[in-house]
């Protein structure tokens, strides 16, 4: 599928003729692969943990913010902090770029000036793929393998402190190989990343940017726009902040994501996002005209259509949509109420992956959302709670 398309016109920047990776530093450590992780944050750290859990590889971390790299070492996310970036790059068999996407572009240009190992595999985790793959094809057209990557899971949190070995478990992990990348190289990368327990999916970079523009980038813009919209109204009426409850928090969680990261994503997917904004403006006009009619059938139909589509999304299967198994439990807001519920679940040795109070009004009925890793956990937890008189749904 991905064979033999390498062109002869490989673009070479002036590379130093001698590699800094001398035999002493360059040989595999006890026969173990050397992985250079560039950007020891949330995603880089999670991948490092997953690699170290499942393979013998030695992960060396570099971060422009040395404190992050040192913290990654302290937290045993990486084996070692890189002290000489170029040398570590030239000695690595796998290089993972886990920086914001505009930085990734700069680092790729820098790497192209180094004497990298011939068998090195370079990959990235950036949320956009076209600019990165265009540059990869320009810099390394067959001599060095660059396979773009984008794990479709994450968080609004940043930094290595939030990294988890299982962060990408069950998520789709998009790979965008170069036209000349062999099937074997793709399999080699998947094997190195097998500890993520993600589902790999090969896509074309342009297709990726359109799809992810629709389901990830655009919703992030809307979430931030919605928060700004509420902020404007809150300046007029202070009760707005106090009354913002579960619904608002659910739909705007992602507005708390890293502005640094999202600025880069928007810059690299501007064309798709501008088209989607045009589309959205039409959608808003459509909602406006439906409400203007005052017609109950049209208004109910609007919500019905959205609910039907949303409810049919593969939330229970392994998909881009969170692979969480959520259980909702009615709960009276009394001291110890949540502890009793989590206690019952813990007695069955069921792991809870997330816990949210969706609505808690003093003395009234609220809703607790308990998330599990598997459908079996969800079903066992439901059973035990219902046996103890809790209403779940
Ligand atoms: N957060 C998510 O949900 C998510 C999901 C999938 C992919 N991604 C992608 O993963 C990448 C990293 O995001 P994150 O969430 O881990 O962010 P993060 O802020 O937790 O980590 C990024 C790290 O990169 C470092 N960095 C920045 N510029 C650098 C440079 N020039 N050289 C070396 N290190 C540099 C930062 O200091 C930081 O430690 C981004 O490209 C993002 O698009 C994020
Ligand atoms: O869960 C979140 O907080 C995310 O925003 C994760 C999310 C997304 O689903 O949009 C964000 C950006 C990434 O490129 C991939 C995943």
Image (cartoon, helix red, strand yellow):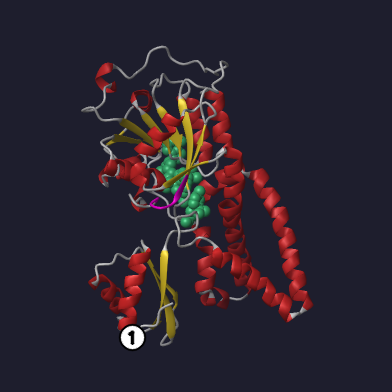
Question: Which range of residues does the magenta coloring cover?
Answer: 168-173
Taken as a whole, is the magenta stretch helix, strand or loop?
loop
Q: x%, y% of residue 58?
A: 27, 34
Asked if residue 362 is positioned above or below residue 85 in the image, the reply reads: below
260 shown above or below 347: above
Mark 1 Cα shell of 10 Å, populated few (<14), some (14-19), many (≥20) = few
Residue 341 lies left or right of residue 13; in this view the side is left
Quadrant of residue 84 in the image? top left
Question: In the picture, which quadrant includes the C terminus?
Answer: bottom left
Furthest residue to the top? 17
For the point 46% across and 41% down, which residue is it? 125
Horizontally, residue 390 falls left or right of residue 58, namely right
Question: Can residue 301 be seen?
Answer: yes
Residue drawn at point x = 38 percent, y = 26 percent: 89
Residue in view at x 21 percent, y 28 percent: 30
Residue situated in front as seen by the camera: 336 or 174? 174
Looking at the image, how many numbered discs can be counted on the residues? Answer: 1
Taking depth in this image into account, of 33 and 191 the one nearest to the observer is 191
Residue 31 falls left or right of residue 138: left
Image quadrant where residue 345 sits: bottom left
Q: Is residue 176 magenta?
A: no
Residue topped by disc 1: 389
Frontmost residue, 308 versus 290: 308
Element carrying mark 1: loop
Above or below — where is 380 with respect to 189?
Answer: below
Q: Residue 368 location, x and y as percent?
A: 40, 75
Q: Quadrant of residue 209?
A: top right
Q: In the rendering, at what x and y percent does residue 92 appear?
A: 35, 27
Q: Residue at x 43, y 47 (%)?
A: 199
The residue positioned farthest toward the left in the image shown: 30
- Percent position (x, y) of residue 343? 26, 75
Is residue 170 highlighted in magenta?
A: yes
């Amino acid at each position: 599928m991905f064979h033999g398309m390498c062109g002869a016109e490989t673009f070479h920047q002036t590379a130093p003729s001698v590699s800094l990776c001398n035999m002493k530093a360059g040989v595999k450590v006890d026969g173990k692969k050397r992985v250079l992780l560039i950007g020891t944050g949330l995603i880089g750290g999670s991948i490092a943990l997953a690699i170290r859990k499942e393979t013998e590889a030695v992960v060396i971390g570099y971060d422009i913010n040395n404190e992050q790299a040192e913290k990654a070492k302290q937290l045993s996310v990486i084996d070692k902090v890189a002290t000489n970036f170029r040398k570590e790059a030239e000695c690595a068999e796998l290089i993972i770029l886990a920086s914001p996407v505009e930085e990734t572009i700069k680092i790729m240009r820098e790497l192209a000036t180094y004497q990298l190992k011939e068998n090195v595999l370079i990959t990235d985790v950036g949320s956009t793929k076209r600019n990165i793959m265009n540059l990869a094809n320009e810099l390394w057209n067959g001599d060095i393998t660059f396979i773009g990557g984008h794990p479709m899971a994450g968080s609004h949190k940043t930094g290595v402190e939030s990294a988890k070995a299982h962060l990408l478990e069950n998520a789709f992990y998009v790979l965008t190989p170069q036209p000349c990348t062999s099937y074997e190289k793709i399999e080699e990368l998947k094997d190195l990343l097998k500890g993520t327990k993600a589902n790999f999916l090969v896509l074309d970079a342009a297709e990726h940017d359109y799809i992810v523009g629709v389901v990830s980038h655009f919703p992030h813009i809307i979430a931030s726009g919605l928060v700004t919209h509420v902020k404007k109204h809150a300046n007029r009426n202070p009760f707005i902040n106090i009354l913002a409850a579960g619904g608002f928090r659910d739909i705007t969680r992602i507005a708390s994501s890293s502005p640094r990261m999202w600025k880069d994503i928007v810059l690299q997917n501007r064309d798709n996002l501008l088209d989607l904004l045009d589309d959205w403006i039409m959608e808003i006009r459509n909602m406006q005209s439906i409400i203007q009619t005052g017609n109950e059938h049209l208004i109910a139909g609007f919500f019905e259509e959205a609910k039907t589509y949303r409810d049919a999304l593969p939330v229970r299967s392994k998909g881009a949509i969170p692979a969480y198994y959520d259980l909702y439990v009615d709960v009276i807001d009394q001291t110890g109420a949540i502890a009793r519920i989590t206690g019952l679940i813990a007695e069955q040795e069921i792991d809870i992956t997330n816990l949210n109070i969706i609505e808690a009004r003093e003395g009234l009925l609220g809703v607790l959302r308990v998330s599990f890793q598997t459908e079996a956990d969800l079903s066992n937890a439901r059973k035990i709670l219902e046996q103890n008189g809790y209403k779940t749904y």
